[in-house]
């Protein structure tokens, strides 16, 4: 009796205190938004109570683990033990680790101390000197690819002890001090290094990571694991789910019958789009800017049957015609009223009245303005049109300085360098004007020839700094094929119809598996596979164009999640046909989030710190986990609909419960692996594997919430199917906060607002 009472005490202490820690971390992320990072680091994450609470959880959990006869299940025990080792490493780092920063200049005397976060100085047992510093650029651009410091360690007498190189993602370790690139001086003669000293904590933590990886892999092959028992559950031997081919309705906006304003012909605009352009710190087709511009201004890739290149050319060559064209999409109702427009679209002339620029007065003196973000968005569109109309955004003329510095790109309206040769100066200033002259005087062939001559100038001036012809054509193909909006709407339409169909079929007492159902299912699945091929091709193109795995921002990760949803659907559909609807819904919702975040995101160079293979592995693992958790949530919705429409259908509800529990294991394990790969990446890049950033904290919160459902032996409430399904729906809110809430509201280092 005493033993049972002790076990219950340990259980309530372990799980109860973990729940309190989850609530504390949730509160901390909200307080950080209000009071700042330093406040929560000192008052919550770094407080003695918080550290003590984690210590008590670790100790009580270990004792409970041993008394629960867990050691008999080798990999399960090793899995839990690895977390204890990781927490021990974190505590060691907390007690003995040190952080700081160091600023060095080339040619200065050696430095013997560094600055700690509390602004106090800490002495090295040696001296550090910066010998050389260099900045590496992406070819043909001024975008930084890497920055490298060559440092030397000396003793007090000035004798060299060691030397080494420090660059992004490649720190240098000397006597347990790790040096990381953090920033550099504007003149390129100095650098700021991050310092981390943690001789024991890192080793213990990495040992825990290694144990975690081994135990996770071994768990799925452990014969007596709960996962293997669920796979053999009797309810999975047969399926009663059937599929419907929901014909995708054609939703297309009717093309406007009004006459479009004047612009270049499709052929001439195509030649203009074929020019090289310096845009977002890289060289790309001018077509890319044209598409981004059209989507940004109008909300779609085409306008009245005109291509993006024709739209951009129209604003540049026929400004007077286009300034009265109502094509500037204004989302804010308040700004529409202030601009005095009747519909959703404004003309450029609507921004001006007899008193000048309306939004300028509004932004300066409009104390009653409630939708300031809407005003800023409208103002941005006005300025973007101005930049295109004046040509300042068309940086199509490269110049290679004689001193060997990076290639510079100019528009014809920029101030040109004085050392520029006269022939180049005249060509840059006058060539686009000559194109306009030839086109206006009725010589389209000559205008196209002049555009081609500009392209030849580009190739002759910087032949080795332009993207290859294959990569250039790939980007143009990507611009033509990337229509996420229509695909998202189609997937959601099919998914909703299929979801209600599957639910209705399960409610039926005796569903029949007819030949028609087999044909429908095959066609339905084939369409889904076709979408997967399309997405895979887009992702491959984007990766080839950008020189890195396209998982660096919100748009790319959500597009990848859409592909993961379909891939996992194909893996599960043989034993669980209803997952096809979930595949469509998850794919459609992922693409919809990508659309909302950025209608047509530019393909940009990676920041140096993001150029790591660990980043790709981290994002892939997290996205697979989120996709599986989305399936579990949708499964819960299906089960609750069944319960409230046909309460006697307990067999189907239990079957959905078993499927969800099976999916929960790989979901939690992928999430765990993703979090700890991210920790290794952070340690390699910044010198700390955990910084209590809101995204990190909410990922941990999500992991702890879902991990609780895996402990059904200790928490028997999770053995009840209806409770589990309700939990799956509510728990998914933590995923939404982790991915969307942090980006939009909480901020932090990981917050890119889906950019």
Image (tube, rainbow, N blue to C red):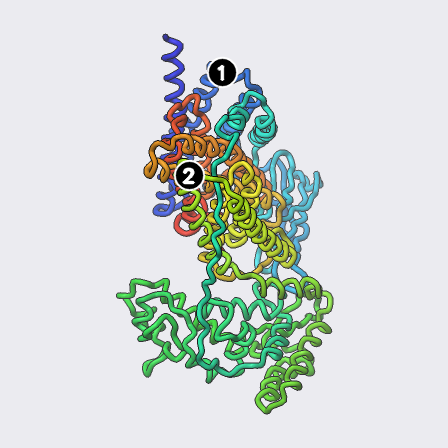
Residue shown at 68% from the left, 64% from the top? 467
Q: Which residue is mark 1?
A: 66
Query: Which labelled disc corresponds to residue 506?
Result: 2
Q: Is residue 151 left or right of residue 215?
A: right
Point out the image quarter for the N terminus.
Answer: top left
Figure quadrant of residue 176? top right
The spot of residue 134 in percent (x, y) is: 66, 55
Of 459 and 448, the residue lying toward us: 448
Of 480 and 189, the residue lying toward us: 480
Figure quadrant of residue 329? bottom left
Of 335 and 721, the residue lying toward us: 721
- Residue 120 visible (yes or no): no
Q: In the image as oriented, which residue stretches furthest toward the left?
A: 368
Residue shown at 48% from the left, 73% from the top? 303
Figure quadrant of residue 3? top left
The spot of residue 75 in percent (x, y) is: 57, 23
The mark that comes first in sequence, 1 or 2, is: 1
Dot 2: element: helix
Which label sits in the foreground, 1 or 2?
2
């Amino acid at each position: 009796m005493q033993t049972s009472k002790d076990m219950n005490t340990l259980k309530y202490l372990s799980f109860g205190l973990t729940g309190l820690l989850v609530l504390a971390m949730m509160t901390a992320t909200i307080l950080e938004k209000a009071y700042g990072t330093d406040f929560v680091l000192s008052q919550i994450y770094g407080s003695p109570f918080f550290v003590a609470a984690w210590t008590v959880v670790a100790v009580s959990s270990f004792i409970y683990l041993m008394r629960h006869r867990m050691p008999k299940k080798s990999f399960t025990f090793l899995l839990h033990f690895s977390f204890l080792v990781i927490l021990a490493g974190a505590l060691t780092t907390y007690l003995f680790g040190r952080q700081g920063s160091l600023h060095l200049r080339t040619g200065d005397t050696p430095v013997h101390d560094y600055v700690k976060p509390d602004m106090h100085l800490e002495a090295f047992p040696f001296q550090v000197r910066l010998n050389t510093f260099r900045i590496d650029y992406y070819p043909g651009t001024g975008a930084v690819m890497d920055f490298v410091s060559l440092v030397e360690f000396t003793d007090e007498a000035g004798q060299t002890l060691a030397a080494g190189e420090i660059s992004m993602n490649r720190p240098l370790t000397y006597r347990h001090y790790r040096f990381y690139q953090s920033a550099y001086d504007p003149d390129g003669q100095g650098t700021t290094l991050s310092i981390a000293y943690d001789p024991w904590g890192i080793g213990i933590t990495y040992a825990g990571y290694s144990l975690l990886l081994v135990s996770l892999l071994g768990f799925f092959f452990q014969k007596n694991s709960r996962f293997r028992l669920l796979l053999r559950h009797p309810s999975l031997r047969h399926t009663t789910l059937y599929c419907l081919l929901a014909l995708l309705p054609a939703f297309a906006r009717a093309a406007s019958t009004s006459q479009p304003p004047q612009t270049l012909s499709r052929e001439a605009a195509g030649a203009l789009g074929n020019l090289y352009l310096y845009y977002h710190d890289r060289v790309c087709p001018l077509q890319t800017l044209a598409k981004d511009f059209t989507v940004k201004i109008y909300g779609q890739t085409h306008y009245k049957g005109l291509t993006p290149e024709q739209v951009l050319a129209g604003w540049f060559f026929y400004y007077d015609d286009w300034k009265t064209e109502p094509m500037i999409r204004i989302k804010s109702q308040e700004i529409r009223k202030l601009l005095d427009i009747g519909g959703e679209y404004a003309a450029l002339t609507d921004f001006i009245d007899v008193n000048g620029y309306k939004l300028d007065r509004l932004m300066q003196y409009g104390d009653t303005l409630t939708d300031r973000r809407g005003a800023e968005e409208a103002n941005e569109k006005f300025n973007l049109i101005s930049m295109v109309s004046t040509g300042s955004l068309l940086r199509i003329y490269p110049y290679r300085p004689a001193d060997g510095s990076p290639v510079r790109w100019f528009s014809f309206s920029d101030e040109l360098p004085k050392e520029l040769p006269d022939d180049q100066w005249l060509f840059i200033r006058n060539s686009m004007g000559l194109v306009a002259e030839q086109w206006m005087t009725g010589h389209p062939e000559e205008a196209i020839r002049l555009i081609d001559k500009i392209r030849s100038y580009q190739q002759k001036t910087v032949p080795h700094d332009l993207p290859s012809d294959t990569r250039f054509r790939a980007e143009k193909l990507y611009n033509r094929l990337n229509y996420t909006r229509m695909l998202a709407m189609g997937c959601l339409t099919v998914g909703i119809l299929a979801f209600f169909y599957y639910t209705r079929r399960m409610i039926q007492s005796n569903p029949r598996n007819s030949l028609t159902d087999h044909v429908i299912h095959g066609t339905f699945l084939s369409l889904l596979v076709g979408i997967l091929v399309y997405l895979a091709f887009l992702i491959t193109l984007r990766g080839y164009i950008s020189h890195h795995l396209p998982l660096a921002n919100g748009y790319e990760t959500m597009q990848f999640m859409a592909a993961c949803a379909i891939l996992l659907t194909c893996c599960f559909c043989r034993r669980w046909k209803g997952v096809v609807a979930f595949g469509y819904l998850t794919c459609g919702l992922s693409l919809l989030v990508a659309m909302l975040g950025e209608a047509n995101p530019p393909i940009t160079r990676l920041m140096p710190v993001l150029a790591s293979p660990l980043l790709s592995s981290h994002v892939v693992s997290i996205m697979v986990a989120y996709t599986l958790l989305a399936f579990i949530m949708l499964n819960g919705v299906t089960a609750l609909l069944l319960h409230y429409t046909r309460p006697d259908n307990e067999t189907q509800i239990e079957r959905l419960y078993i499927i969800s529990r099976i999916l929960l294991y790989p979901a939690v394990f992928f999430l765990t692996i993703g979090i700890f790969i991210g920790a290794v990446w952070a340690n390699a890049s910044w010198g700390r594997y955990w910084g209590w950033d809101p995204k990190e904290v909410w990922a941990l919160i999500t992991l702890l919430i879902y991990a609780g459902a895996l402990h059904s032996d200790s928490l028997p409430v999770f053995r009840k199917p209806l409770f589990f399904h309700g939990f799956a729906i509510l728990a998914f809110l933590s995923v939404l906060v982790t991915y969307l809430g942090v980006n939009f509201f909480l901020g932090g280092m990981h917050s890119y607002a889906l950019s």
